[in-house]
Amino acid sequence: MPRTKRASSQHDHDDAEHRATAQAWADDLVRALDKCDRLDATMVGLVYVGGLTHSLVAQRLALPLDQVNTGIARAMQCIGQSLTGGGTALALRPTTGTVLE
């Protein structure tokens, strides 16, 4: 029985650590998005949080698709610079926010 308690305690600790790390990363991402152009950040939110395709974002915002594609690329570059301090653009998986690098 003590082993189970110890394993459970370690799992709870790991779970809490994971949540804290994820929250810190999310906070950093929000701060990075705040440094980007507002429209570009909105487009990123619609794609990567809202799960919309670039085409649907273009329709929703009444913008040409190439402007949406460019805006998202620009925002990703801005986010990468903010998070890494350099020129690295990030690749995120839509709706999960998982970094793909």
Image: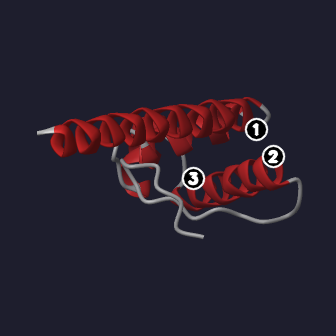
Q: For the view shown, which residue lies furthest in the right direction?
A: 86
Asked which quadrant contains residue 50, the reply is top left
Q: Is residue 16 left or right of residue 24?
A: left
Give the Cα separation between the discs numbered 1 and 2.
9 Å
Place of residue 43 in the rendered image (x, y in percent of width and height, measured from the top left): 54, 42
How many circles with numbers are drawn on the protein? 3
Q: Is residue 91 left or right of residue 54?
A: right
For the residue labelled by badge 3, is the local secondary structure a helix, a strand or a loop? helix
* Figure quadrant of the C terminus: bottom right
In the displayed structure, would residue 66 be above or below residue 81? below
For disc 3, the neighbor class at 10 Å (few under 14, some 14 to 19, many from 20) is many
**Amino acid type, residue under disc 1 in the picture:** Cys
Q: Residue at x 31, y 42 (%)?
A: 11
In the displayed structure, would residue 65 be above or below residue 31? below
Q: Which residue is mark 2?
A: 82
Say if mark 1 contacts mark 2, CB within 8 Å: yes
Q: Which residue is mark 1?
A: 36
Nearer to us of marks 1 and 2 is 2
Q: Which residue is mark 3?
A: 68
For disc 2, the neighbor class at 10 Å (few under 14, some 14 to 19, many from 20) is many
**Amino acid type, residue under disc 2 in the picture:** Ser
- Numbered circle sitting on residue 89: none
